[in-house]
Amino acid sequence: MSTGREIRLVEEDDGWWSAIDRETGVASQGETREEALQNLDEAIEVTEEARADDNDAPEPDAPWFEDS
């Protein structure tokens, strides 16, 4: 089953592989192509969870932030 993602795989000079998801900009690496892709899947999942949990910053609760 295809996810429709565009992924760039690069074999680095040291023999490791980098995997970059073009849509999200998330990247990962591994000793093999398969490991790089598995690590990329995990990195994307964690990134999507973090983005979904992203809340606005809380209002400051300190007297020096009060308007004069």
Image (cartoon, rainbow, N blue to C red):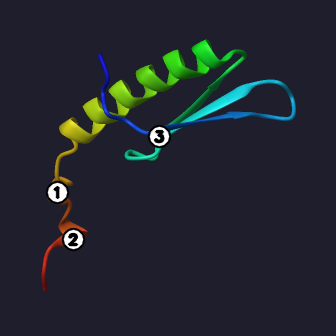
View extreme (front): residue: 1
**Which x, y percent locates residue 58?**
16, 53
Q: Name which residue type carries label 3.
A: Val
Question: Is 36 situated above or below 65?
Answer: above
Residue type at mark 2?
Phe
Label 1 environment density (alpha carbons within 10 Å; few <14, some 14–19, many ≥20): few
Q: Write down the residue under mark 2.
A: 65
* Residue at 24% from the left image edge and 71% from the top image edge: 64
Residue 32 screen position, x and y as percent = 69, 15
Cβ–Cβ below 8 Å for labels 1 and 2?
yes
Q: CA distance from mark 3 to mark 1?
A: 35 Å
Q: Which residue is mark 3?
A: 26
On the image, the x and y values in percent for residue 10 come to 69, 35
Q: Identify the secondary structure beneath mark 1.
A: loop
> Residue, x 83% and y 24% (percent of image)?
15
Q: Are there few (<14), some (14-19), or many (20+) residues within 10 Å of tag 2?
A: few
